[in-house]
Structure formats: C-alpha cells, structure tokens
Amino acid sequence: MHLAVAARTDVGRVRKGNEDSLHASANEYRGLFIVADGMGGHAAGEVASEMSVDIVSHDLSDLNDLDAPDAHARVARALRDANRAVYERTRTERDKLGMGSTVSALLLSEDRYIVGHVGDSRIYIVRDGQMHQLTKDHSLVQEQVDAGLLTPEQARRHPQSNVITRCVGMADDIEPDVFSGDVRIGDTFLLASDGLTGMIDDRRIQQLLLSRAKPERIVDALIQEANMNGGNDNITAVVVRVLAPGATPTDRDVTPIPPARTHG
C-alpha cells in the first residue's frame, strides 16, 4: 500500500470535552480508517465513540483481503458487535443511558475500498477533480432532503441537523450500510465528523482536498476553518491519498496519529 495519511481531532470552540474518536492504521495489504462521533451526557459519548472505534478496529485488524467473499459481512458484523457492546452498557450503567455513536469506517487496498457506516459522520472521495459523498447521512434532515422537502444547503443549516435516525447503541441491533468500490491512484478520501462538515460547505472542502498540499496541511486547514466558522462541535478529519508505487519517500510520509481526543 502506498498512502499518505493525516488524522486529527479537535475539541472545537464551544464544547468542554471531545466525544469524537478516530483510528488510522495500515499494513502492506490495506489501510483501516475510522471516525466515530459520540453522544450522551456525563462523558458517555466519549465512552461510546471509544468503544466503537476499539471494537471495530479490533474486529477488522486481520481483514487484509478486501475481495474475500465474507469481507462485507465481516464489516457489518464489526459494526453490530460495537452496537451490541454499547447498547448493553446503556442497559447496565445508569449514567450511560442514551449514549451512542456514529461510526464511519474505510478499508482501503490498492484497487478496492469497503465502507461501513452508521450515523452522520461522512466519507468523501475526490477523483478526477470532483468530490463525491460516499456515505449517506442517517439523519432526520437527510430524510427530508430525500423527500424533496429540503435542499442539501437548507439541511446543513437546519436547527435539527444533528438529529440522527441510526447510530451504534440506539437499539439492540442495527442495519449498517456496507458497500465497496474501486480505487485508483490519485484518489483522496476524507472521513469527517459533523463538527467539520456542518461548519464548512462542500465546495470549500473540495477545494482544500484538491490542493497539492500534503494531507497533514489539509487536515490542519479543515480544522482551522471549522473553528473560524464557529467551532460549534468537536472536529475530526482523516485524509488519505492513494499514491503511485514509485512515489518518493517524502510523498509517502504518514503523519503520526495524535491521541484520540483533545480536551479543552
């Protein structure tokens, strides 16, 4: 695998704690990237997102062949395992009642990607100068967009834009979205919590992802702009660029992954 990767999470300018969690790792066969955005009082959201990332990354740690017949099923099972663990904890610990987390996971090989998704954290791909949102938000406003009642821009600014209809921990079982596609050299992927996508419009995100800057600089710029626009929520971004095998070592530099949260 020839990837340039950067990942960072930031508390933002309003929240006192960070309920986002992330994971980024790669071996010679594939990369694994996860963003989770927790919810719930008394730091329960932080617990839910950490549990989700830990379980999904553990379950998928040895999934190296993305063309394997059971690859999709394993991704779905990992998300269900996380859901079951979080849900059971909400039932046994009173202060964890109502906690949950989004999870968006990307497995990436030289020629294929698999996405597993629950909630409204997003995964985008930039290819041939165009950006496309791979995931579909499991949210109240997305349902209204689908019904033609709201435009995507109205949905982004809607007062109920943070109301999600599906997440890890919401019920005893979930139905995750799992799908795959082809990968090409030059593709750039972004995984982001809604603290980023809710503060920066897609046109600006695309502009930054299309720049020739290294992923580390793009991640820093995305988080800086989300904070400049208000920083109303925790902000997490993971940028992954697929490089040609002959790329220089400098091009393949992988930014060290910081701790999963930053407390303010």
Image (cartoon, rainbow, N blue to C red):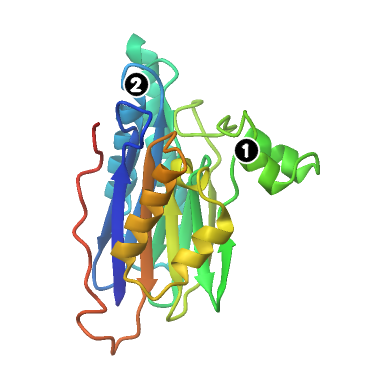
Q: Is residue 84 above or below residue 54?
A: above
Q: Is residue 208 above or below residue 147?
A: below
User: Which marked residue is nearer to the observer: mark 1 or mark 2?
Assistant: 1
Q: Left or right? Give the position of 77 relative to 129.
A: left
Q: Left or right? Give the position of 46 relative to 150.
A: left
Residue 9: name its quadrant.
top left
**Residue extending furthest toward the front:** 228
Density class for disc 2 (Cα within 10 Å; few <14, some 14-19, many ≥20) is some
Disc ID at residue 173: none
User: Helix, strand or loop at disc 2?
Assistant: helix
Is residue 199 in view? yes
Density class for disc 1 (Cα within 10 Å; few <14, some 14-19, many ≥20) is few
Residue at 69 percent of width and 41 percent of height: 154
Q: Report x, y in % for residue 129.
A: 55, 76
Q: Is residue 114 above or below residue 141?
A: below
Q: Earlier in the sequence, mark 1 or mark 2?
A: 2
Residue at 29 percent of width and 28 percent of height: 17
On-image quarter of the N terminus: bottom left
Q: Report x, y in % for residue 56.
A: 34, 45
Q: Report x, y in % for residue 32.
A: 33, 59
User: Helix, strand or loop at disc 1?
Assistant: loop
Q: Which residue is mark 1?
A: 157
Is residue 103 in view? no
The amino acid type found where label 2 is placed reads Arg
**Residue extending furthest toward the bottom:** 246
Q: Which residue is mark 2?
A: 89
Q: Is residue 217 above or below residue 245?
A: above
Quote the CA–CA distance across marks 1 and 2. Answer: 33 Å
**Residue extending furthest toward the right:** 148
